[in-house]
Image (cartoon, grey):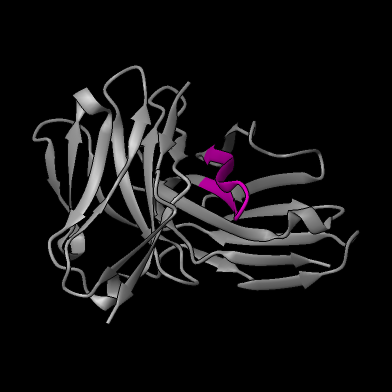
Amino acid sequence: DAGVIQSPRHEVTEMGQEVTLRCKPISGHDYLFWYRQTMMRGLELLIYFNNNVPIDDSGMPEDRFSAKMPNASFSTLKIQPSEPRDSAVYFCASSLAGAPYNEQFFGPGTRLTVL
Amino acid sequence: AQSVTQPDIHITVSEGASLELRCNYSYGATPYLFWYVQSPGQGLQLLLKYFSGDTLVQGIKGFEAEFKRSQSSFNLRKPSVHWSDAAEYFCAVVNQGTYKYIFGTGTRLKVLA
């Protein structure tokens, strides 16, 4: 299995531009999590899905952030418009059906820089 | 409130020395606890987890952790550190109602040759 796949690995954009981050979870996993990692705030859970349905988006910082999961094998996290304070590493993770407190498998992350 | 505290931001040890990384948690019920490792430029990899039973848990790469309820701790240990263990280590507890992980701020390990 290729593991959790994220693209792009690096993204540099200018303030005000739209940014789309992509995630392909491990096949068969039905929970998908989006995290943001910064030096100041550490790892933060932004949103998670179960069977493609958003369960909890209370960690999404503001309306500029949105996430979708149109099918079991693909999810996006969009920032529109982007701001310099959005610069961070964004991780996607997935876990197996049944108990989400089972191991989460993390992707390599997308390093976002907003100038 | 549920929380995880990793009191050491940075730790430096010599290769071959023993290692202990501290983790304290705050959780109202029996916690489900995890240790993850993050190598530079990589995602997080699970080292070990505790749900119940034996309080000494064995993980990958020669790591172990001991759950101590009386001290609200879940410290990670390794008897002999290798240079490849240099990474950042995260302790986490899962909220069993919401399934959210609560991560500590991490401990960055440096290994001297």
Q: Which residues are magenta?
A: A33-49
Q: Position of residue A46 (x, y in %)?
A: 61, 42
Q: Residue at x 14, y 45 (%)?
A: B57
Q: Position of residue A54 (x, y in %)?
A: 60, 35
Taking depth in this image into account, of B103 and B94 the one nearest to the observer is B103
With respect to residue B89, does A62 lie above or below? Answer: above
Q: Is B60 inside the magenta-drawn segment?
A: no
Q: Position of residue B25 (x, y in %)?
A: 35, 31
Q: Is residue A29 visible?
A: no
Q: Residue at x 55, y 64 (%)?
A: A109
Does residue A1 appear to the left or right of B65 in the view shown? right
Quarter of the figure with the C terminus of chain B: bottom left
Does residue B39 appear to the left or right of A87 in the view shown? left
Q: Residue at x 47, y 26 (%)?
A: B98
Q: Which residue is the extreme one toward the bottom?
A: B113
With respect to residue B106, does A3 lie above or below? Answer: below
> Total label count?
0
Q: Position of residue B17 (x, y in %)?
A: 17, 68
Q: Which residue is the extreme one toward the left?
A: B54
Does residue B31 appear to the left or right of A59 in the view shown? left
With respect to residue B83, does A63 lie above or below? Answer: above
Q: Residue at x 30, y 77 (%)?
A: B112
